[in-house]
């Protein structure tokens, strides 16, 4: 069953008298219980997309269906009912946790706002959630600054999950953490996802992070999805030169391969190149690429790419 369905989403910001097209026509589906990874280098529009999908940020146009209902067109007054079912986990949990509130109060707030349970039940749910995310119960009486980065992210996860949402957008949830802590948080998210049958839209600039959690991966470049497919398929048979470059940028100690950085810089979303938006950085670009924008097309079951020369 499709839980989230986004069609032709655009997020354009006014910028220096022009329009900055951060998201430039993205369509995507997330099925119930599925984890979709969204990858692409910094600045390609991932956060703008994630926020727009939850109606937490700007949206210029595009349809958003949630559980078959037109969430994108729902009036403000109806958003609260959706909010409970849709949550977000941020890169910097500290920035999103009120430093003057105890962890217990931070976790109680969503239950109070949504009028869930009586006092005793709320307390029980807070304690239960602390257990599930691997925090001690006395954490409820402590404040965010008393915790390490990894523990703060556990608090952020607890806060997002306490309402038992159906879809969680995780925006770079481990990017600010030490490498050794990243795996713990990814494992926690994967376990919570299984236990609670969540759907996740998991955003990361790092393809290797997404690899361990995502059933399916979308590769984003300058506001567009340029390749999508099952994660094994994308990893083993990437079709788009940008996906290949992202894979090459991941160090692979098993194959004793060094990471090669992506060539060139991401062009400005204020001035998107004509034709294929990747052409200036693409090692196999031709004249066709410089003039004609390649549409997303199917190259194998469930595998799509937007490249004139893919599969040739
Ligand atoms: N509120 C905003 N106003 C103007 N430009 C923005 C805003 N948020 C993001 N941008 C621009 O939109 C583009 C995409 O940014 P973002 O969605 O944060 O990408 P990512 O999360 O992939 O790094 C960037 O060029 C960024 O500078
Ligand atoms: S369409 Fe052309 S420029 Fe774009 S990725 Fe494919 S080969 Fe490279
Ligand atoms: Mg971002």
Image (spheres, rainbow, N blue to C red):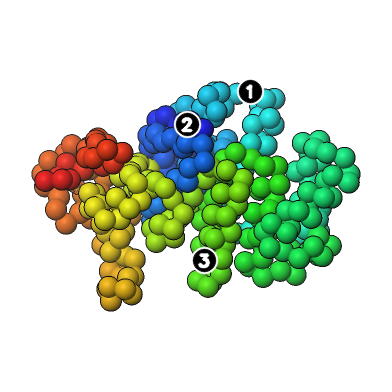
Q: Residue visible at 30% across and 51% down?
A: 234
State the CA–CA distance, disc 2 to disc 1: 22 Å
Q: Secondary structure at mark 1?
A: loop
Q: Secondary structure at mark 3?
A: helix
The residue that disc 1 covers is 75
Could you say where residue 276 lies in the image, as x and y percent from the top left? Answer: 22, 43
Comes first in the chain, label 1 or label 3: 1
Q: Nearer the viewer, mark 1 or mark 3?
A: 3
How many numbered marks are there? 3
Q: Quadrant of residue 163?
A: top right
Left or right of 295? Residue 134 is right
The residue that disc 2 covers is 2
Circle 1 crowding by C-alpha within 10 Å: few under 14, some 14–19, many from 20: few
The front one of 58 and 81 is 81
Could you say where residue 242 lies in the image, as x and y percent from the top left? Answer: 27, 53
Comes first in the chain, label 2 or label 3: 2
Could you say where residue 109 lies in the image, as x and y percent from the top left? Answer: 79, 46
State the CA–CA distance, disc 2 to disc 3: 29 Å
Q: Quadrant of residue 94?
A: bottom right
Say above or below: 19 vs 47. above
Left or right of 268? Residue 112 is right
Q: Residue visible at 56% across and 23% down?
A: 69
Mark 1 and mark 3 residues within 8 Å of each other at the beta carbon: no
The residue that disc 3 covers is 183
Q: Quadrant of residue 103?
A: bottom right
Comes first in the chain, label 2 or label 1: 2
Q: Nearer the viewer, mark 2 or mark 1?
A: 2
Q: Residue visible at 75% across and 70% down?
A: 146
Q: Which mark is residue 114?
A: none
Disc 1, ligand 1: is the CB inside 8 Å?
A: no
State the CA–CA distance, disc 1 to disc 3: 39 Å
């Amino acid at each position: 069953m499709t839980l989230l369905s986004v069609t032709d989403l655009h997020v354009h910001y006014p910028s220096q008298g022009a329009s900055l097209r951060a998201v430039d026509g993205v369509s995507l589906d997330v099925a119930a219980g599925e984890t979709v990874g969204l990858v692409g280098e910094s600045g390609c529009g991932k956060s703008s997309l994630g926020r727009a999908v939850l109606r937490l940020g700007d949206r210029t146009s595009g349809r958003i269906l949630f559980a078959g209902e037109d969430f994108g067109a729902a009036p403000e007054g109806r958003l609260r009912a959706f909010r409970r079912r849709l949550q977000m986990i941020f890169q910097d949990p500290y920035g999103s946790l009120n430093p003057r509130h105890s962890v217990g109060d931070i976790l109680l707030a969503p239950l109070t706002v949504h009028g869930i349970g009586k006092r005793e039940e709320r307390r029980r749910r807070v304690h239960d959630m602390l257990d599930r995310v691997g925090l001690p119960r006395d954490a409820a009486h402590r404040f965010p600054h008393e915790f390490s980065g990894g523990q703060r992210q556990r608090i952020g996860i607890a806060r997002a999950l306490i309402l038992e949402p159906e879809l969680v957008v995780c925006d770079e949830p481990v990017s600010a953490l030490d490498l050794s802590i990243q795996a713990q948080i990814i494992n926690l998210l994967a376990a919570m996802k299984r236990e609670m049958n969540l759907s996740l839209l998991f955003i990361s600039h790092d393809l290797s992070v997404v690899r361990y959690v995502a059933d399916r991966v979308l590769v984003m470049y300058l506001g567009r999805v340029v390749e999508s497919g099952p994660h094994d398929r994308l990893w083993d048979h990437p079709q788009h030169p940008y996906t290949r470059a992202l894979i090459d940028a991941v160090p692979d100690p098993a194959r004793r391969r060094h990471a090669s950085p992506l060539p060139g810089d991401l062009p400005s979303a204020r001035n998107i190149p004509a034709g294929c938006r990747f052409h200036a950085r693409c090692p196999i670009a031709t004249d066709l690429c410089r003039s004609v924008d390649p549409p997303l097309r199917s190259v194998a079951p469930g595998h799509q790419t937007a490249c004139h020369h893919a599969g040739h």
